[in-house]
Amino acid sequence: MNAYSFNKCSISLVVLISTGFLLSQCGNSSAEKSHMDETPVEEEIHYETVKVTASRPTSELNLPGELESYYETDLYPRVSSYVKALHVDIGDQVKKGQVLAELEAPELTANLTEAYSKVKAAEAVYGASKGTFLRVLRTSRTLGAISPVDLDVSRTKAVSDSLAVVAANAHYNSVEQLVSYLKITAPFTGVITDRRLSPGAFVGPGGQNGVPMLKIKQLDRLRLRLAVPEAYLGDIRRGNPVQFSVRSFPNQTFTGHINRIANNVRPETRSELIEIDFQNKYGKLKPGMFASARLPVNSSVQGSLYVPKSAVISTLDRTYVLKLIAGKVVKITVQKGDDSGGQTQIFGDLKPGDIVIRSASEDLADGATVKAQMIN
């Protein structure tokens, strides 16, 4: 065998060995892939849970609230008519009694003229019957000149005509009152915050589906409403000072006093509503602003309950946590209090040691069964 033949055989041997190795690897990969495909995948979601804990009592209670105007109202027309003119728009300052809009209703003006004519006609008839009665009365003083029956008839006629005058005046006053409704005036001093209609629009009962013409709010005096948890109601007194702040002025503190207490505990949140009046002289604060109020409380109050901030869900309807009972979700309505160190103070139908979902989700329905994993 020459050198060329030897090298050729060696190359063939190497190719065969390499091919066998690759086939072996492919077989192993296929087997491993088949084995992986047969392994079940864990698709269940485990929710982290924590225990409700009690903390030491606080000497100051932080509560969220919302500023509201002391007076606010929607202005609706009282009679069916058309908008003739609007004298104000959004943002305008108005005084009590100021004419804001004028309406037109030709039929009401015609009715007023007709009612006035009826008053004058009734007064003329009464004047004639009254004069007749007085003449008959004077004549009756002559014995035998007027019979008693004629005297009674003239008296009755005069009384009847006088009552007709009263009725005509009452009708005229009612129509005049309706005509006065064609001018929309400001019920109090404030600011126009909304305008919905324009001149030419039909308004009144059934007009524009009951849309208000204007909205007016008082700005120089505001209300701050707070829901105080039941545990602290013993410390709430009318006249107590309350300090609060708003996001628009984070470095400024405002002070008011408790003016009204509802004297009623809401069963769904176990809290009582209080109101603080604030004299907004310079118009710095606006209705609708969210406020954070601080109320001094007695340190002898029992410890509060705390959960992570992520455990509390706040919606337009309620604020709640997801409590687990025997592996099932139960929505518990709560009232939020102070926030500190990533924990939120809550008040509701809970006690220390209850288990709640750490990162609550609105997708979990009441009564849903979940897998839980306790986090220390």
Image (tube, helix red, strand yellow):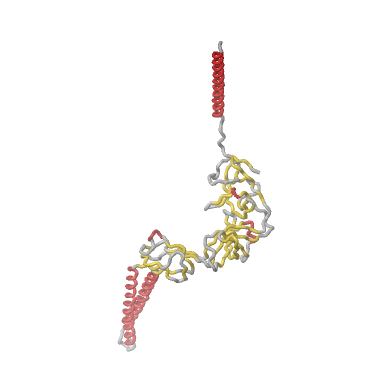
Q: Where is residue 301? Give x, y as percent.
A: 67, 57
Of the pair 9 and 219, the residue shown nearer to us: 9
Q: Where is residue 205? Give x, y as percent.
A: 39, 62
Taking the spot 64% from the left edge, 48% from the top edge, the residue there is 52
Task: Report how many numbered discs are placed on residues in the image.
Answer: 0
Task: Check the image and name the residue furthest to the top.
Answer: 1
Image quadrant for the N terminus? Answer: top right
Of the pair 359 and 246, the residue shown nearer to us: 246
Q: In this view, does 127 lie above or below 87?
A: below
Task: Check the image and name the residue furthest to the left.
Answer: 145
Q: Where is residue 117? Give x, y as percent.
A: 32, 75
Task: Check the image and name the residue furthest to the bottom.
Answer: 142
Q: In this view, does 176 lie above or below 62?
A: below
Left or right for 3, reference 139? right
Q: Where is residue 217? Give x, y as percent.
A: 49, 65
Q: In this view, does 297 lie above or below 5?
A: below
Res 149 seen here: no
Image quadrant for the C terminus? Answer: top right
Task: Check the image and name the residue furthest to the front.
Answer: 3
Of the pair 340 and 129, the residue shown nearer to us: 340
Res 319 seen here: yes
Left or right for 254, reference 185? right
Image quadrant of residue 87?
bottom left
Image quadrant of residue 57?
bottom right
